[in-house]
Amino acid sequence: EPAFILLDEPFAGVDPISVNDIKTIIGQLSERGIGVLITDHNVRETLDICHKAYIVSEGRIIAEGDTETILANEQVKQVYLGDNFRM
């Protein structure tokens, strides 16, 4: 019975059907009370399923919070997402 599971780049190079399968499994783990830590560059897929995110730039956390907080953060837009990013 793990308390946490770490997924490193679970969406990298994965087809859309498998991405949805992975997201479903992550949701099921969360519902069972298992914490899921995801590191991934696929922002849309990751922010779509996470409760809290940390954005790291040059080895430092520049923002943390829920999806809305991350998307509204000007530094995140400037450094990582750009002005045209949409979910």
Image (cartoon, grey):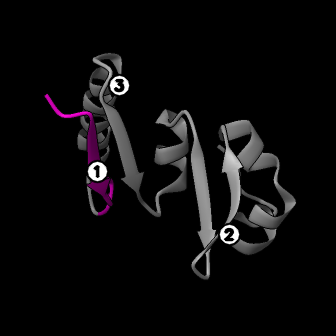
Q: Position of residue 70 (x, y in %)?
A: 72, 48
Please identify the residue farthest to the left as the structure is shown. 1
- Which tag is nearer the camera, tag 2 or tag 1? 1
Q: Front-most of 8 and 11?
A: 8
Residue 6: numbered disc: 1
Screen quadrant of the C terminus: top right
Residue at position x 54%, y 48% from top? 44
Q: Secondary structure at mark 1?
A: strand
Vertical arrangement, residue 73 with respect to residue 32, above or below: below
Q: Position of residue 6 (x, y in %)?
A: 28, 50
- Magenta range is 1-12
Question: Could you tell me how far apart the alpha carbons at marks 3 and 1 are, in whole angstroms?
Answer: 12 Å
Q: Are marks 2 and 1 in contact (CB under 8 Å)?
A: no
Tag 2: amino acid: Tyr
Please identify the residue farthest to the right as the structure is shown. 74
| Horizontal side, residue 64 vs residue 6: left or right | right
Tag 3: amino acid: Ser
Residue 3 in the magenta stretch? The answer is yes
The residue that disc 3 covers is 30
- Graded by Cα atoms within 10 Å as few (under 14), some (14 to 19) or many (20 or more), the crowding at tag 1 reads few
| Rendered image quadrant of residue 11 | bottom left
Residue 77: numbered disc: none
Residue at position x 31%, y 62% from top? 12
The residue that disc 2 covers is 80
| Rendered image quadrant of residue 75 | bottom right
Tag 1: amino acid: Leu
Q: Are marks 3 and 1 in contact (CB under 8 Å)?
A: no
